[in-house]
Amino acid sequence: MPSSRDRRVAKELKDIQTDPAAGITVELSDPSGASMEYLHGHIFGPPKTPYEGGKFDLLITMPNEYPFKPPKIAFKTKIWHPNVSSQTGAICLDILRDNWSPVQTIKSAMMSIRLLLEVPNTDDPQDAEVASQAVKTPALFARRAQEWSIKYAGAPQRQLDLQGKYAESQAAPEPEDFGGYHPSLVGTWTQMGFSTKIVVQVLKERRVPTFNGDNYRPSDEAVADITTHILAKIAEEEV
């Protein structure tokens, strides 16, 4: 006699088959139907994402306690995504952990995973490297995600829209180069309104020692001398 889990799984699989527009499919790993423990899931990459056109395979393991315990779901197809391990395919999704409820279904879990492909959650990442890239350089993240989709999920080559959520934010400023000088020493002149770049240039031209980056207070004469040369350099560049 089929267990309550098996009856529930069989019913849910039929429900999934009646909704081909959902962008997911799920089938038994054992075509004979003798075991309902392992399922094969497929997610079709949502449009207007780097995953568009790809077919992503997932392994679904149904515990005996289902639906009171969540299914274990992992990507078999490699995918570049903040909420999926690029190494193991493990998925970080709250409904597959603490927020699971018996009213959830295989379909709702798969649809939630598909939604992650549309709206990654970088606040709760599975892969910190990917999440960092998605936050700091979203266009680079999108291009790499598409490259992986083409390589591993059979997605077609196409023009990727890098506007909107994948648009690069204003580039972060390059870290200031103090030329080996202590920032506080350079600050003697930058607080006057001069740029770090020109201050460092003049300090080097005047052969002011760095003292291995240690801080020191220049004499009033030295401050005046460097200031004079900074002003002269600015005047030269404006000519």
Image (spheres, rainbow, N blue to C red):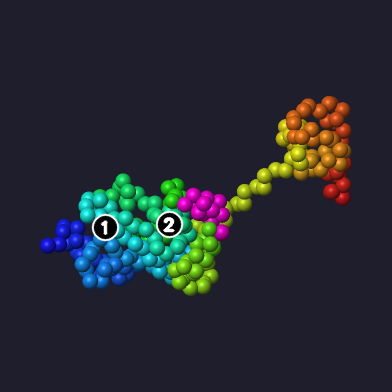
Residue hosting label 2: 88
The residue positioned farthest toward the left in the image shown? 1
Amino acid bearing label 2: Thr
Q: Residue at left 36%, top 63%?
A: 58
Q: Is residue 157 visible?
A: yes
Q: Inspect the image, locate mark 1, and give the three-letter code of the amino acid beneath it.
A: Met
Please state which of residues 71 and 142 is positioned toward the viewer in this rendering.
71
- Please provide the residue range marked out in magenta: 127-140
Residue 140's spot in the image, x, y percent?
56, 59
Left or right, 61 with respect to 127, comes to: left
Quadrant housing residue 32: bottom left
Q: Nearer the viewer, residue 157 or 21?
A: 157
Q: Residue at x 51, y 73 (%)?
A: 157
Residue drawn at 26 percent across, 58 percent down: 62
Q: Nearer the viewer, residue 37 or 168?
A: 37
Disc on the earlier residue, 1 or 2: 1
Residue at horizontal 86 percent and vertical 41 percent from the top: 205
Q: Main secondary structure of the magenta part?
A: helix
Position of 135 compared to 177: left or right?
Answer: left
> Which image quarter: residue 5?
bottom left
Is residue 144 located in the magenta-colored stretch of the structure?
no
**Which residue is under mark 1?**
62
Residue 66 at what x, y percent from top left?
A: 23, 54
Estimate the x, y position of residue 16 in percent, counting from the top left: 26, 66
Check disc 2 and report its element: helix, strand or loop.
loop
Neighbours of disc 2 within 10 Å: few (<14), some (14-19), many (20+)? few
